[in-house]
Structures are given as structure tokens and as C-alpha cells.
Image (spheres, rainbow, N blue to C red):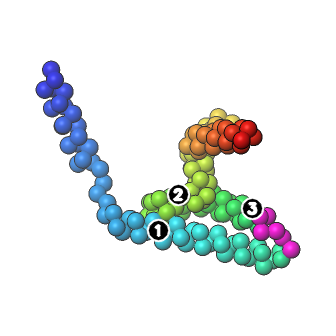
Amino acid sequence: MDKEIKKRNEAYNNYVKAKIPKTKPWPSLFNSFWVGGVICCIGQGINDLIMLWFPNMAQSNAWAYTLIVLIFLASLLTGLGVYDKIGKFAGGGSIVPITGFSNSITSPALEFKHEGIIYGICVKMFTIAGPVIVTGVIASVLVGIIYLFI
């Protein structure tokens, strides 16, 4: 019986190895690095423009507006189908900045829009990002409680 299980597992592992797409690690790493850098440079450019147009604005407020613009642009590009192509090309370089988080919320919402506004968009929007948000909120509360008593 044990031999049959090992044989079946080996056959399955061989099947999985045959189906996994082959990637070249160095080009993938390079593309991830430079695309992530370009996204960050775009964010810095937006921040610089905001500071130029509103010179009396505090830097922290300018960063908040920069994040709003980046989230909007990533959601717009996701809706147009462009961000998915960027993600396929850049891999991790497109998901590390806040634009990747925006994409992870917008994609499921678009995928399930046919189910209606409430049961489709509103419910499915957080299927990917929801656990991240919940974990972040719980961790911040715990750290805040620890900080309160230390």
C-alpha cells in the first residue's frame, strides 16, 4: 500500500513539474526591480508636482494626496486591463508598492461585478486584500496596547 502511495505521489510531482511554466530568474528579477523603481519614481514625481502646485502644503499631506493619486491610477489601469499586463511582465515589482494593493482590491471587484453591487462588488472586493487588512488592524491594535503599557 505504501509503495502505491509513493508511486502516485511521484507521478503527481512529475505532472506538476511538467505543467509549471519555466521562467528565467535573472530577467524576471531585473524587470521586477526596474518596474517597481519606475512606479516609485512616478510617485515621487506626483509628490513633487503637488508640492510645486501647493507650496504651503505640509509634506505629510502631500504624501497622502500622492497615495490617493497612485491608488486611483492603479485602479483605473486595472479597470482598463493594463495593470494586469504590467503585473505579468514585472511580477513582484508591480505588487510591492501601494499600487499592487489597489490592484488586489479592484481586480476581484471587477471580476464579480456581474453578481450585482452588493453581493458582487462590495462583498468580493476584499477577498484577496481582506485578510491583509484584518491582520494589519489586529497587529496595530496589539502593538498599540503593548506601547500603552510600556
Q: Which amino acid does label 1 sit on?
A: Phe
Q: How far is disc 1 from disc 2 in space, using C-alphas?
A: 11 Å
In the image, residue 60 lies in the stretch drawn in magenta = yes
Q: Which amino acid does label 3 sit on?
A: Ala
- Is 53 above or below relative to 117? below
Circle 3 packing at 10 Å, graded few (<14), some (14-19), many (20+), is: few
Q: Are marks 2 and 3 in contact (CB under 8 Å)?
A: no
Q: What residue type is labelled 2?
A: Ile
Quadrant into which the C terminus falls = top right
Say what secondary structure mark 3 lies in.
helix
Q: Which residue lies furthest to the front in this view?
A: 150
> Circle 1 is placed at which residue position?
33
Task: Measuring from the top left, give residue 137's x and y in whole percent.
Answer: 67, 41
Q: Which residue is drawn at 72% across and 76% down?
A: 48
Question: Magenta residues?
Answer: 56-61
In the image, residue 133 lies in the stretch drawn in magenta = no
> Circle 3 is placed at which residue position?
64
Q: Which residue is drawn at 30% across and 54% down?
A: 21
Which picture quadrant has residue 123?
A: top right
Task: Measuring from the top left, give residue 103's x and y in whole percent.
Answer: 58, 54
Q: Choose between 24 and 77: the one closer to the eye.
A: 24
Task: Measuring from the top left, give residue 13's x and y in whole percent.
Answer: 23, 40
Q: Which circle's residue, 3 or 1, is located before the other in the chain? A: 1
**Callout count:** 3
Q: Is residue 112 visible?
A: no
Q: Residue at x 77, y 64 (%)?
A: 60
Q: Which circle's residue, 1 or 2, is located before the other in the chain? A: 1
Q: How far is disc 3 from disc 1 in space, using C-alphas?
A: 24 Å
